Amino acid sequence: MEVIKIKGTDDTPSIVLDKDNEIFEISGRSLPEDVTAFYEPILNWLDEYAENPNDKTVFSFKLVYFNTASSKLLLDILMKLEEMHENGNEVLIKWYYPEDDEDMQEAGEEYAEIVDIPFEQVSYVL
Amino acid sequence: MDKHNIKGFLEFVYDFYRSMKAHEITLVYEGEITHQITKAFTSLTESNMAKEDESNTVQKKVFHVMVECLQNISKHADTFGSDDYLFAGRGIFMVSKGTKDYHVTTGNVIENRKIEELTEMLEEINSLDKDGLKQLYKKQMKEGRVTDKGGAGLGFIDIVRKTGNKLEYHFLPIDETNSFFLLSSSISRTN
């Protein structure tokens, strides 16, 4: 399957979606000019991946900032993963937050309440 | 401009400067709000705050509020007058810094027919406590009311949640179809 590798900028996140090497990660800052257009290829990729996923998918979110427009798209990603989980695939979300960033920690907790997937909160030092 | 007018104009510039100082305004802009403008203003403010040793928490909050406020103007400000005079996506944007807090203030044209709905939304958000705001944010995010414009609701809720302060707002009538919508958020410097 095609590998998605997007290098982050000061307003768009780094994204790696690599089925063969089992890397699924979004990190950095997310406030793209056009959120829908930015995340569309990611959501399409996940649709294709969901047809024949790995035995286990560990998806990492390691964001330091995202705006409210991005928050909806992040939920869309999580909902696709939730669907995979519902279909009997093993999925784990790892939500990384800087240890002093309560807002980012809370954002993870909220997503965990909305979607029904195994969710792990991981704090790290920036 | 003749000589007299130039002098009058330059005096106005000085008055303007003094009134900016008096109101502790660190950034003021009137015009179209684009993504480039948003990036420039946020990075300028970020580097100013870093220079002044503002805490990380405060810096992050100011950044959040600025992004959401600028996005509200660029996506929701209405057209007023002919297209080449004032167009959609324009407004005034201001950051001021007092001893206790930062204020981010925006102003833009809004059609009178939208005022009632907007007021209801702002009043609802201002009436909620921490948990109520969280529930409303989750609800709006789930319902996916992010239209092609991107919903303003989430932005307002996010500002109140991040700052812990209510939104101050005011509508000033322009004519029978339009008003000027002013919105001010404050971010405490001592948390």
Image (cartoon, coloured by chain):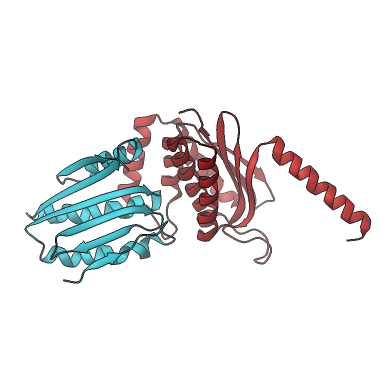
Say which of B6 and B161 sits in front: B6
Q: Give the total number of marks visible in the rendering.
A: 0
In the visual, does B21 lie left or right of B148? right
Q: Position of residue B136 (x, y in %)?
A: 36, 39
In the rendered view, tell whether residue B100 sits above or below residue B52.
above
Quadrant of res A126: top left
Residue at horizontal 67%, vertical 51%? B176
In red, which chain?
Answer: B
Residue at horizontal 35%, vertical 38%? A103
Say which of B133 and A25 sits in front: A25
Say which of B119 and A81 sits in front: A81
Quadrant of res A120: top left
Residue lying farthest to the bottom in this orientation: A2
In the visual, does B91 lie left or right of B58? right
Say which of A45 and B157 sits in front: A45
In cyan, which chain?
Answer: A
In the visual, does A86 lie left or right of B76? left
Name the image quarter holding the N terminus of chain A.
bottom left
Q: Position of residue A45 (x, y in %)?
A: 22, 66
Q: Position of residue B128 (x, y in %)?
A: 41, 31
Residue at horizontal 20%, vertical 71%? A2
Q: Position of residue A119 (x, y in %)?
A: 18, 43
